[in-house]
Amino acid sequence: HFFDHSHFLLFSVPPPSLRIPKPYPEETPRTPKSRAMYGSTEGGADPARSESGGSLHPAHERWWTVPMATTAGVVLVVLVGILSLMIVASTTADVEQSGGTPMPDPDAADDYTKDYNPSADEGEEPLRPTPVAPGAPETRRTMTHDDFTGNQVDSRRSFGYGYYVFEALPNYRREAVVTGFFTFSPRPPPNEWPKLTYIWRWSEIDWEFVPFTTSPQREHVRCRGPFPKAKCETYRTDGENGNWTKRPLEIKGHYTNQVVVNSMRQNLYAAKYWGYFSQITPEQIESLTSWDALIKATDENGGPGVMFHYGEEWPLPGALCYKKGNKDWICLQMLPAGQSMINSVAINVFRMPYGRRTVEGRGVKAPFIPHKKGDGFDVSGFAMTNEQFVYNPWYNPYTAYHTYTIRMAKSGISFYIDAPGGGFDVDAVTPVQHFPASDYPGMQSIGPQMPGGEIEWFPRYGSYIGQNWSLGCSQFMMNMWVDKGWGGVPRDFHSTSSFVRRVAFRPINPTTTKKYEQPFEMDFSKLDPNRWWPTFRKSWVLEQDDAGSKSVLNVFMTKKSPDGKPALELRLCRRKMHLVGRAFYQLIPAGYAQVFEMGTGDLWAEANVPNYEYFPLPKGVTLKVWVVVRGRRCGYTLRNTGFEVINGTGDNPGGATCSFMSTKSDGAYVFKMASGASKILLPPGLPPPSWPPQNFHGF
């Protein structure tokens, strides 16, 4: 997005009489986060997948993209690019130093991280970050996403309207990473479900923890008092103000769709003054008075009254500008002075509002706003967001568990922190933020009410065997990843972890009979850390990226999380360190196959061609299993170096060999991952037609 052949990115400030920051979040387009992390896309490459393997928050542009005008503009870009690098370094250090408003922090006494060693359960040496004194320069070298391996966990089920609850402690070492707890409606892969791909709508609702972000937002929620009864107010840029010097400054209020349109109208006046949008007449700008008018004025085919070809051309309002000291010519902080990102969480709603164009699939017509297509099947429309920071000096998400609730309903989306009743009793408390569907028409494309929202489909690849989803329903998802544009520039560190105690869902309508709105709850603190996988896999799938962005092995049960109780641990670590010598298996059968643990009978994996399933091999464990095909079985020992038939348990006479799988693995079955771990294929085939062999007397 930064450069093409005819545009340049304007980082700097226009002349003193006019400052026009580039549109950003609230209603900013983003590439869908389908990232092959969402649903199973390995049957065909997902064109929306990010290079980092993380959420495709693109390289967060901060200023308008305008046509190349003068050579001086190029010089300006170079000079301000250097300044931008200085700003990133300054912000990264300043965020850590900011102590916030001097108010009581109830979590301060519960800093579990002081004596906690997340690696103790795995027999690793304690890894402590190098302390940096307040005000001291950061001496650790900078890193990129290629230096780290993260994780992603997806629920097998998808859900409709209801309460989505996460009880968690993110990023306990507070490094420059992104931690997300969110809902997402998986996109049917275009090569498998082309008709459904046409009408799919990006529907995602996020809690994201980014203590070192350098990405400003146009809205900001400020709360006072402990959650869940904190008093919260929303502030935004003064986008409707004709006084351009005041527009980046904050005022109370929300960026509803109507306010967005009003701000765009002011931006158009300013842009025309400086020679842009020459094709748009003053009369057309005057006619831009409502959301419906904006939709009618956007059509890729042009025509009478059309002002924009794509949603990407909309001059959306800019980000809040918090200045530092007397340097009033550029924005240096994500929050006002005295407020720290450490006391903040980011919330977001991704959606694709209806437009004047329509596309049809499976007998359903779906309206969309024209956009610049990313691939031949990406016709779902222009994506918009409501990203903003929630700040509260009484709140620190990195020192104790908190409960995070998303209420998804036809009437709108609400966010709650530490609601009573395990996150479900929200009637007596005020939401941290609420987006009513009446003020944000795009909300109508979220959930089962989206066009074709109740149409069922199932993934033909990946670990979701026998799993049916509805197009408009959402999975629970949890992940950690590195993205310098959104999470900040990471420094050299070994690892950091997030801990999840509980995930639960309850429907809006408690008497519903719809299968996608049935209650669900998993309390990870009640799982046996030594035997967690067979229970865990019934409800969850671990994502794997062989290129290194996420690993199956970075999700496991820890016996002692920071509060002393078991929890699900999500780790992000340096590549080729923690995972060296570790292995995971991929069951990829030629037909239907299962893997059972000997002795217990626990199911470790199940797949039916073309589906597959990953499963981790516990560290330092030799696992003995039955591999079962068509009711026949062979016994195998699974090690971190490969597999081998257990003598006497094969299904051929004498039991030394197996009729449907190799006796032992060789180099063709073992692959080294970029993370440092090994992936070992477990490829049972079909027994021969004459099966069982003559003179075979069973097991």
Image: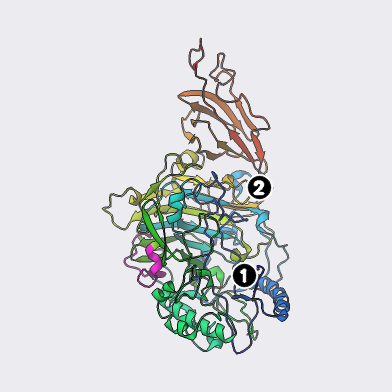
Q: Position of residue 651 (x, y in %)?
A: 53, 19
**Which residue is nearer to you in this view: 698 or 20?**
20
Distance from disc 2 to disc 1, alpha carbons, whole Å, reads 29 Å
Q: For numbered disc 1, what is the local secondary structure?
A: helix
**Which residue is nearer to you in this view: 599 or 565?**
599
Which contiguous range is marked in magenta?
Answer: 423-444
Can you say whether 290 is above or below 112 in the image? below
Q: Is residue 224 visible?
A: no
Q: Position of residue 235 (x, y in %)?
A: 47, 78
Amino acid type at mark 1: Glu
Is residue 318 a member of the stretch shown in magenta?
no
- Left or right placement of residue 443 versus residue 134 in this view: left
**Which residue is nearer to you in this view: 33 or 631?**
33
Indicate which disc, 2 or 1, sits on the residue closer to the N terminus: 1
Q: Position of residue 434 (x, y in %)?
A: 39, 69
Q: Position of residue 20 (x, y in %)?
A: 57, 81
Q: Which residue is mark 2?
A: 675
Confirm or deny contact between disc 2 and disc 1 (CB under 8 A): no
Q: Quadrant of the N terminus?
A: bottom right
Q: Is residue 59 visible?
A: yes
